[in-house]
């Protein structure tokens, strides 16, 4: 089957009066249908740049990119509008993309209901927990019916306990809705908890150090963390990154 997205030997440099900064070097990978792929690498190695390239915010310097599906975005901060309640925040995605039909509104609110937001529709973001805000943000993104979600460190602004339970929530929603994901993170634990495949990047200029396929299909993050294999993968990846 064709990949949903594919990068082929992508290079990316930024140019300034001080010269060239090489960020990505010969990056090739793909994401298949209903797969969760994590890009893991040290801070500043170019992870967000990969998402910016996929969302057409940045050009590439060399190589090729293929996008065969509809993309959705969810970022580190929830980006909710403080003056709108949960319901209007969820519907706002449809409004700004001019897809605010009754059918689409119904779909968005059915997702909110299915994933436990019904009692919070009249709440404003300031009275929601960090985890709940990220859940609202995910439902807003899903309302636009993307095939593949681009997630930029979606758990990094949360406290440790919320992070763990939200990973389970988001994993469940993604699998239930049969979505594909490209998520970036610098957190080894997070990458092993949630993904089917991890692409480990080196320091800048980033190259792929290793691609690791995990054997945890359909096992939730909280369960994975109790498995022996989890800790073996942690050690393997820790050693890979420690040699950077
Ligand atoms: P990460 O997300 O892995 O922390 P980024 O992709 O944000 O890293 O950045 C990678 C490198 O590229 C950093 O050194 C950063 O300073 C540089 N960079 C990112 N965006 C720009 C830009 N628009 N102009 C110049 N340099 C940039
Ligand atoms: Mg980043």
Image (cartoon, rainbow, N blue to C red):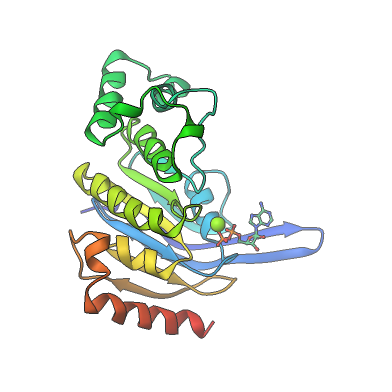
Question: Closest to the observer: 102 or 21?
Answer: 102
Quadrant that contains the C terminus:
bottom right
Point out the quarter of the image occupied by ligand 2.
bottom right
Give the x, y percent position of residue 152.
Answer: 47, 52
User: How many discs mark residues in the rendered view?
Assistant: 0
For image coordinates 33% across by 15% down, the residue present is 101
The image quadrant where one finds the N terminus is: bottom left
Question: Does residue 189 sit above or below 236 in this rendering?
Answer: above
Look at the image and tell me whether residue 68 can be seen: no
> Can residue 196 be spotted in the picture?
yes
Q: Residue at x 43, y 80 (%)?
A: 238
- The residue lying at 57 percent from left, 66 percent from top is 43
Q: Is residue 40 above or below residue 82?
A: below
Residue 114 in percent (x, y) is at: 22, 33
What residue occupies the far top of the structure in this picture?
102
In this rendered view, identify the residue nearer to me: 10 or 35.
35
Residue extending furthest toward the front: 127
Residue 232 is left or right of residue 131, and the answer is left
In the rendering, at what x and y percent does residue 120 appear? 35, 28
Q: Position of residue 106 (x, y in %)?
A: 26, 20
Measured along the vertical axis of the image, is residue 229 above or below residue 23? Answer: below
């Amino acid at each position: 089957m064709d990949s949903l997205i594919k990068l082929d030997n992508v290079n990316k440099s930024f140019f300034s009066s001080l010269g060239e900064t090489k960020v990505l070097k010969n990056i090739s990978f793909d994401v298949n249908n209903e797969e969760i792929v994590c890009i893991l690498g040290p801070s500043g190695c170019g992870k967000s740049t990969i998402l910016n390239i996929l969302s057409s915010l940045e050009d590439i310097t060399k190589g090729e990119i293929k996008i065969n599906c509809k993309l959705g975005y969810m970022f580190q901060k929830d980006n909710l509008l403080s003056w709108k309640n949960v319901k209007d925040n969820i519907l706002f995605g449809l409004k700004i993309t001019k897809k605010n039909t009754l059918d689409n509104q119904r779909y968005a609110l059915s997702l909110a209901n299915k994933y436990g937001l019904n009692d919070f529709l009249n709440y404003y973001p300031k009275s929601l927990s960090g985890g709940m805000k990220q859940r609202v943000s995910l439902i807003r993104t899903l309302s636009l019916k993307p095939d593949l979600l681009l997630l930029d460190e979606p758990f990094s602004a949360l406290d440790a306990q919320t992070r763990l339970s939200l990973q389970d929530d988001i994993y469940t929603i993604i699998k239930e809705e049969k979505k594909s994901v490209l998520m970036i993170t610098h957190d080894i634990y997070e990458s092993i908890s949630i993904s089917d495949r991890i692409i480990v990047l080196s320091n800048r200029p980033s190259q792929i150090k290793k691609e690791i396929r995990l054997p945890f299909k359909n096992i939730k993050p909280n369960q994975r963390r109790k498995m022996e294999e989890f800790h073996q993968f942690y050690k393997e990846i820790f050693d890979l990154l420690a040699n950077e």
